[in-house]
Amino acid sequence: MAQRAHRRRTVTVTATAAALITLGLTAPVASAATDPRIDLRVLVVDDGGSPVGAITAQLKSEGIPYTTVDLRDSGRSTITGAFLGDTVGGRPHARFQGVVLPNEAPFGAGSAEQTALETYEKTYGIPQVDAYTWAHPEVGLDYTDADGYSGSLDGRTATVSAAGRSGPFGYLDGTFSFEDNSPSVDESYGFVAQPRTGFTSYVDVPVPGGTGIGSLLGEYAHDGRRELVVTFAYNQYQQQFRVLARGIVEWLTQGVHLGQARNYFAVHVDDVFAPDARWDTERNCTPGDIDCAGGGDDTGTPIRMTAADAQYAASWEQSHGFTLDMVFNAGAGEEWKSENGGKDALADQLLADKAKYRWVNHTYTHLFLGCVQDTSTVPWSCAKNADGSTQWVSRSDISGEISNNYNWALRHGLSVDRGELVTGEHSGLKTLPQQPQDNPDLAPALAANGVKWTASDNSRESEQRAVGNSTLTVPRYPMNVYYNAGTRTEMADEYNWIYTSKADGGSGICENNPTSTCLDQPLDTATGYTDHIVPAEARTDLGHVLSNDPRPHYAHQSNLAEDRILYPVLDRVLADYQALFAADTPVVNLRQSAIGAELQNRARWQTALDNGKVTAYRVGNTVTVTAPSGTQIPVTAPEGTKQQQLLGTTTFGTAYAGKRSAWATPGVLQAALTLKLP
């Protein structure tokens, strides 16, 4: 293996010297000392189309630096030899490790820019992704009239070939399907074609209406260049792209790049120990809730887990190898106990199984921690003082809610992290339109209680932000499994109210919300939850998992009670995931503090990139990265990669999806992170 690598370097250096003359650059004498420096940055040539946009989104998500040349911009940079490379200290210097193009020749075959780009790729061995093109010989494929097909791919099952599994797509289990969310809309169009000499298919599909298989994605090696050819259209949200995105990036960067990606899934179960109010299918609201028009107390039976429900939760976790985050209100549980003869079988069972869960402070009684709410009208408003200023829940009341719950957890031996908090309804944080600012007493109370990570609602605030000087938010995805539904029928009824038009008996909310789509007709309340809501919610949640998005999802304890309606969604997400991915690419299930730290690291890294404070390059088998002091640096590299320390080396990173990756920093007394590739 060492001899093969040595021969390859020798040829590369010789080719580099010759090609630099073509580029109009000064070529140094070819030798081991002039192995080219290749910057860890990607060139993206953008035509505004969704395929290039999808790959760009993946690069940004992972934290991979890239430079965009926008073909729609008359003032854009011109692709020349000088733009692409030069020399640094007598060493040939390639500014980009990979190139993303909208198609195989966006500048026009034979044009000066296209020629400069192709020469650059041959000179330095730089890969090129053709984000979307049609099947024709210039990309190594037969036309589709030769045992091929062009048209809709909706619902088709594709297979990762043996070459794909042994190459950049080895993290996949073998097959995946193209989305088919609407029978009346063509969602995916593509060209299925037969490979020619030099083309290695990575993704195949049976030829629709024909026999045999054809390629949808593969590598075309020709004229000293390599292209990854994609012959189907896609956008960044479609599952067929999401499952392939990691492999496209690994092929583009040859498995060595800044940035990293995981498939994350965490589920918070709010209101543990507390009861939840129940949806009224007649009034179409939740009696006792402050937004239920007409008022009235909640006289219905509240929804609360039983000891049997708790036993089921522990058993489900064990059988699925997945840990739930129990977001608990101990005071509400104590109140329940006092109202029910001083006994609470649910609490006893959960405490008996306490080591099986992660526990998160949800405040003692679920008090609303923002402004004092005036519930005399629907919707509520913030109560005012005599001078017109807002009445706020006090700092002492907020602090008491946090500390009382935390201290209860310590007394009962729960493995609670003091730095984590979920306030009731994410209260205390700004709540539009009624409360356009945070409760000014919230940040000091959080700081006093050592809270570093407080949850926010991703549907209101999708980005992490600071609350005072010591706390950051952790946005959470609300699941379409409602807190006030314990049965499938209740869930379908409320879903109908929200997602059907007034003409069909619904609220009409979906008609006035640009982000919602009304149902064609109301769901059957007997079957609608299983047939429609579960697959729809599971598809949404899995989309988050496949998007390198660590944000947690949240539901409520009521969804683990009665019909236990949360489990079918979780079962579907995990089963669909396991059908897609190999064993070396598991779901990553983090607790809230780790998720907060991941988001914080990403933000700091992006700031360093935006400010031009990162330098990263590869020379031969050595990768060197410098960044502002204290910056966590995300890197992905092959198995066998070592980090150079002052004395000796250590194994780099952790294994995931066939690679090694980590947030890393330079070793002791070192100014740069240095990696030795295998």
Image (cartoon, rainbow, N blue to C red):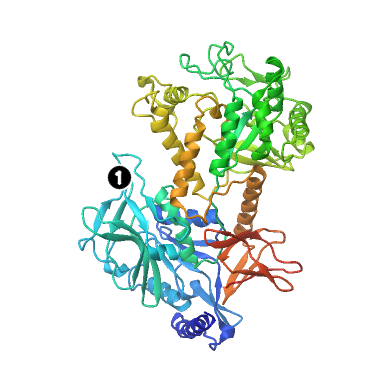
Measured as percent of width and height from the top left, residue 593 is found at 67, 44
Residue matched to label 1: 186
Q: Quadrant of the C terminus?
A: bottom right
Residue at disc 1, secondary structure: loop
Measured as percent of width and height from the top left, residue 632 is found at 67, 58
Q: Does residue 653 sit above or below 384 in this rendering?
A: below
Q: Is residue 31 left or right of residue 272?
A: left
Q: Is residue 429 visible?
A: no
Measured as percent of width and height from the top left, residue 596 is found at 65, 45
Q: Quarter-wise, where is residue 160 in the image?
A: bottom left
Q: Is residue 490 left or right of residue 366?
A: left
Q: Amino acid at mark 1?
A: Asp
In this orientation, which residue lies closer to the viewer: 129 or 525?
525
Q: Quarter-wise, where is residue 382 in the image?
A: top right
For disc 1, the neighbor class at 10 Å (few under 14, some 14 to 19, many from 20) is some
Q: Is residue 417 visible?
A: yes
Residue in the image at 53% along x and 52% along y: 586
In this orientation, which residue lies closer to the viewer: 559 or 6?
559
Measured as percent of width and height from the top left, residue 8 is found at 49, 81
Q: Does residue 220 sit above or below 632 in this rendering?
A: below
Q: Is residue 197 left or right of residue 620?
A: left
In this orientation, which residue lies closer to the viewer: 358 or 235?
358
